Amino acid sequence: MAGGITTLDLRINGEQRVVAFPTHHTLLEVLREECGLTGTKHGCELGECGACAVLVDGRPVLSCLALAAEMKGRDIETIEGLQESNELVPLQAAFADLGAAQCGYCTPGILMTAKALLDQKPDPSRKEISEGLAGNLCRCTGYHKIVEAVEWAAAVERGENREYDAETLWGATEPGLETSLETGPETPTDGSTD
Amino acid sequence: MAEPVRKQPRSPVPVRETSIIGKPFRRVDGRPKVTGTTRFADDLDIPRLCFMKLSRSTVPHARIRSIDLTRAREIPGVLGFLTGDQMPETFGILPVSQDEHALCLDKVRMVGDPVVAVAALSEDAAHEAALLVEIDYEPLATISSLEDALATPEPRVHEDARGEGNVHKAVSMEFGDLDQAHAEADLVLKDTFFYQGNTHLPMEQHSAVAVPEDEDRITLYSSTQTPHYVHRALTRVLGLPASRIRVVATPNGGGFGGKSDPFNHEIVAAKMALQLGRPVKITLTREEVFYCHRGRHPVLMTLETGFKKDGTLTGQHLKSALDGGAYGSYGIASTYYTGALQTVTYKLPAYRFDGVRVFTNKPPCGPKRGHGTPQPRFGWEIQLDKAAHRLGIDPAELRLRNLETEGAVTANWLKLGTIELQRCIEAVVEGSGWRERYGKMPEGRGLGIACGSYLCGAGLPIYWNHMPQSGVQLLLDRSGGVAVFCGETEIGQGSDSVLAAIVAEVLGIELADIRLCVADTDLTPVDLGSYSSRVTLMVGNAAVEAAERAKDLLAKAAADELEVPTERLVFASGRVFDAADPDRGLSFQETCIAAEARFGTLGTVGSYTPPRSPGRYRGAGVGPSPTYSYTASVVEVEVDSDTGIYRPLHVWIAHDIGRSLNPVLVLGQVEGSVYMALGEAMMEEQEFRRLPPRRSRALVHKMPSMLEYKSPTFCDMPPVTTYLIEQEDPRGPFGAKEVGQGPLLPVLPALANGIFDAVGVRVDQVPIQPFMILSALAAKHRRFGPDSFPDVNFGETLAVPTPMQGGDGKAIDDLQARRRSGMASTTGTMTTRDEALSQHKKLTTD
Ligand code: FES
Ligand code: FES
């Protein structure tokens, strides 16, 4: 076993904290074990699935491949820092509403990667969203709801007033059946304030 | 939440007026999942937690000569070890296949079989110690494949298994007169297909945390889909009364059937925690998840089906052979499932099924999304396509001509519920422009169609008993909040949301006023688990019953208070009011206060037991379900005939859902199924290879990593158009049927049929690799696939007259056959219900 303990002043989600950890431990391990920030997940610990993605200086990094010891002076962002006070940001709200999170295990990694994508490219095409997230695996959703959620959040972040797409919520209209459309206040859901 | 566009439900028949059910609402676990606060098993931290690792077999088949822990003990921080002799009792998911040990006793049966457990203060120390455990093996011949297993009776993978040699199970049954059916046919097609095995690959690796509560009480938190069955296995192996063991299923980071067995690591963690007197955690590595497996069985199958000139089916003979891997798992049920649901989609007047499962020295196969049915469905729907071409009938039309009907009893005695398959087919035909485009597109472009159907919950529990399959308990009090207790397990499919929404809907309150306590064997009524697409229907019906009973209580109290007859009371918008005079009413909380004052502490229960199925023959236990879901799909595909590389361009899929409890969640299940189907059709495979001779020639997993086991990414998914076809089924809660598994079934054969339309070749196996298309293009018969089915002794055929023949659901020689074989009837899914119930005592206490 590699010996040695490293003590570092880490900046995570804008908060400074002093952390001591075995020097050979990855950022993933230190976030989850030393810092108790278990929102960051792991699916392989070999850089193959994207579940562990966090942002380092604004760029997505696979925390299972990054050594915590190298994080001195870097700005680390994790899923725990995404929401604004008790409010979900549009990306989060759309993931929750549109079924872009089913089991939710891939979700933190995908949300962080998507955030970096939107920070860089506020108006991505569907293809750019898919390519930007192609390093993140999700076994539940079939990906489309995620792309739709990112697209919607991007529009809202750009200040556009956008509704969820009817087909995303209801499915395609069965050919030959009449539909009637109406707009109305949505039923309150889980009591969240967003 | 932004205000979504709201559409009226589109059913052609009026659906019940509802305020939550049937509408897109945010799933109740949505917020924790997007904030990272959902606590999965590996996220649990408990004071004094220590870590466990398993030292696993490096050889595929061997006797254990000796185990040496000397070097492992020297690692600082090591707390203790366990070996197989400390837990000699066997376990397994099916009562009939109790063939696993928590740690291997005297032999190992696959690479990855756990032999020694070590616990230490840190995961690093446990890992290092596990590597230093020295195990001396006496190698045995490796049984590597189906052919190997059939040809090599010795050495047996399981020496005391019931079957012959390395055959785990053989079954043969005939419903009606198949010879006559074939004689009456104008066309009899015989085709052989192969469906490669593949794995669930849930994003979350299995994890378990065991906490000793007392000298002889223990709690296990685990990422399991079936806490109740884990509870039973722990009871058996630990030798503790069930009342002293608590199993809590943490939310699963994906399951797909891969977390439905009780696992060795769960049992070992519990034993270790009891031994050390401190909490123990084990989280599997991704490689270990590949060894747990229980994935899709590789199945070789032959279908021989008769058709009349007009496309009418006369009968089918299906033979299937399953490579089961090293343990029984659900395998006997899987074997039956490769045959059981062939009859529920199209009218099949005569049917014969022969199935066999063998043991091999590979990770055990089990239930994966669709459990045993995607394989024969793949063959069936391709064969229908072939028949349509031979008979000159449009493939969509051929299917429409043979549809089963609502309420029918099939040749193998399954009673069907509602069937909206016709509308499903019409929707995808219309949506894809089938009539204008099928067979008419330029070379290299094609459309394929296929259908499928699936259970809405297995009609019988895994072990025989008189008790309900699902229970729900409500606690109401003066707060106006409702606590809902239920054993159901959230694996991402939305079961928590289904449960909460049903209770809120019946009581006319908001989701925010519901609190859930789920999947906890100490605190919640039993639900059998998240498998066989049973949760929406069974938990849902139990929840409706519990909520209706609560509503009755509350209505009595409100009626007195308001001086209004109970029949006139409406529960809606958080109020209880007079339908004739809506201003006259109480808030829901005031109603609870009135009821608590009148009746004392308020609580109700509900439960669900599926109806009895008409089949009475041996094996009739697999296949019955309260009702079935139906799906149709069209896949458009583009094929490059120079390289064989192909790409699905679009998937249209229509699913007969009964009624969507929440269309967003339903769509998610459909799209997730399409995705998983395309993965299996195009790339996913569980493959093995031999090490080179200088390294023991051991049979090892070819790709136990996410990088090597190819699965589709964001960029591989074609657009999907989903139609939710609604027609309430009275058997389901608010008319709902299943959606988690059925939509996977038609997509694979639709893709293969699309490739045929594009370039005129048949690939009769999955995953379909480009080289297969090239090789078929070069072949005389324009086909790639297996040519022959091995010679198998399926045993004596059980003859069961069909309903059309005036049968009574029993086999002709049932009694005599059983007397001859001297079979005891303790085999869970394999005997008739009556037999088992008459032996009730023995069965429920084993
Ligand atoms: S856990 Fe880091 S990429 Fe999979
Ligand atoms: S939501 Fe389950 S893996 Fe993505």
Image: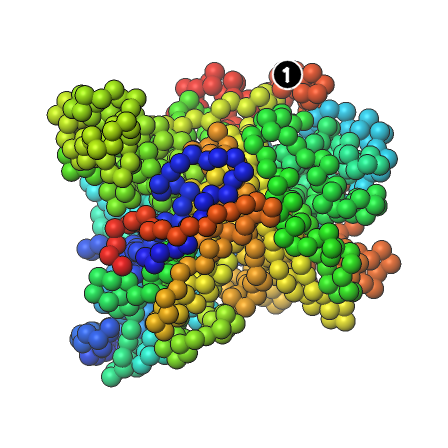
Which quarter of the picture shows residue B777? bottom right
Q: Residue at x 50, y 43 (%)?
A: B10
Chain containing the residue with disc 1: B
Q: Quadrant of the N terminus of chain B?
A: bottom left
Q: Quadrant of residue B186?
A: top right
Quadrant assignment for the C terminus of chain B = top left
Q: Which residue is pictured at 37% across the width and 70% down the height?
A: A160
Given residues B97 and A130, the one toward you in this image is: A130
Residue B818 % position (x, y): 62, 19
Observer-nearest of B27 and B775: B27
Q: Nearer the viewer, residue A93 or B110?
A: A93
Residue occupying the point 46% across, 65% down: A147
Amino acid tagged 1: Asp
Q: Identify the element where label 1 is drawn.
A: loop
Residue B610: horizontal and vertical position, in percent? 47, 27
Q: Position of residue B301 (x, y in %)?
A: 71, 44
Which residue is tagged 1?
B808
Q: Residue at x 42, y 50 (%)?
A: A182
Q: Is residue B297 left or right of residue A16?
A: right
